[in-house]
Amino acid sequence: GASMGSRGSEEVKECNMRITALGKEGKWKEALQVFESMRGEGAKVKATEVSYNAAMSTLTRNGRWEQALSLFEDMRSDDTLKPGTISYSTAISACGKGRRHKEALALLEEMKGKRIQPNEFTYSAVITACENGGRTEKALEVFDSMEGDGVAPNVYHFTAAISACDKAGRWEDALKYLESMSERGVERNVPAYSAAISACVKGGRSQAAIALLERMERDGLEPDVIVYSAVISACGKAGMLDAAMKIFHQMRERGVEPDVVAFSTLISAFQHNDQWEKALEVFRLMEESKVKPNVIAYSSAISACERAGEWRRALGLMDRMKGEGVKPDAVAYNTVINALAREGQWEAAIKLMEDMQAGSSAVPTVGTYCAVIDALGNGGEWEKAIGSYTNLDMEGKASGVSVLEALLKALKKCGQDELSEKIAREADVREKQK
């Protein structure tokens, strides 16, 4: 009968390999059929622990984590099967997919209680489960406990821990873990650096982010466009515009092509720091690089034009934006209308407001109405300003003081002081009657 046994174990191996292979191709239903044929009374080939692990792994990989966990339950209640490190780790990994961090932690404890040794994969799975469940503190606790359990953290554990620090806003810890990697001879990779840089950026530590970027390059690693953009954004927020520009150029010298996020980050950094010429310069560079601007890039460039008093360019950008199929938001619209208002370009201002009312991508705000009345005042069209205000009032859109104040200001600008005072008095009486 020995020959029969070895033949049987060959068949089991073949079945297990088929389950795994089908799982990798995304054919989980077929994989499950093979597995099910190994269970039950009349099964010719009996499912072993390895078969269960292969099936659980396949289900987890294909998003069927609940089914994977129910197989693990079957396994636990079967006296002929002994779930080991791999079974537990696979079950924990299924918990992670389902954001069930409590179950993942309970399984880790159960392993220790049963003297089943957790390995690197077990810890990766637990840390990921805690992170997916939004329990970053817990993820870090588990990471810190690994060594006591005789498992040395590898690059994946460190990266997961740093990424947990990033999510929890703990930039100091992120730096500590990154340091700790080099002390232990664990090679720091791009994801580990990226997460640490992201943590520094969120914590407003732009100097630290720049230093990490430099160290990353010294380590012979190639930062990607996401890392560069994050550091540029940190510099922009700290008002370090020379540094932002330097990093942008450095990125291009390294052969990393700036994408729409990198460009728009730099443009908005200049725009927020009142350097509108520079903002427009980068916008032009963006176009030369054949990168299609997004809403942020367009809005920042439009704001820069408004600051520069260049209403024609602002209007031109708005038209191009629509032509490109990028939907302007209310901020972009209002910025252009403000630029027009300043120069008394009331026709164009009204046209844009009507555009907004016609159900475009943005709804007019109080700011829109004030700017249009402003435009009429600056264009000397006080009767139209009154007409516009009256219409808004009838539609219930002139509530609050801002729109009325815009009208009074417009009338004064046109030398209609008496009329302005009369309207102010009437509005006062109306308020009191309410």
Image (spheres, grey):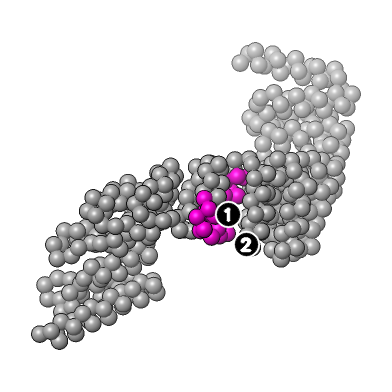
Mark-to-mark CA distance, 2 and 1: 9 Å
Q: Amino acid at mark 2?
A: Leu
Instruction: Tell me the crowding category of disc 1: few under 14, some 14 to 19, or many 20 or more residues within 10 angstroms, Cα based.
Output: many
Q: Nearer the viewer, residue 146 or 271?
A: 146
Q: Where residue 213 sits: x, y (%)? A: 65, 53
* Image quarter hosting the C terminus: top right
Mark 2 vs 1: CB contact within 8 A: yes
* Outermost residue to the bottom: 3
Residue placed at 72% from the left, 37% from the top? 368
Q: Quadrant of residue 3?
A: bottom left
Residue placed at 40% from the left, 44% from the top? 141
Residue 10, above or below 293: below
Q: Which mark is residue 221?
A: 2
User: Which of the marked residues, 2 or 1, is nearer the chain's N terminus?
Assistant: 1
Instruction: Tell me the crowding category of disc 2: few under 14, some 14 to 19, or many 20 or more residues within 10 angstroms, Cα based.
Output: some
Note whether residue 42 is visible. yes
Residue 116 is one of the magenta-drawn residues: no
**Residue range of the region highlighted in magenta in the rendering:** 180-201
The main secondary structure of the magenta stretch is: helix
Q: Amino acid at mark 1?
A: Tyr
Residue placed at 39% from the left, 74% from the top? 25
**Residue bearing the label numbered 1:** 193
- Please tell me whether mark 2 sits on a helix, a strand or a loop: loop
Q: Where residue 360 sits: x, y (%)? A: 65, 49
Residue placed at 42% from the left, 49% from the top? 143
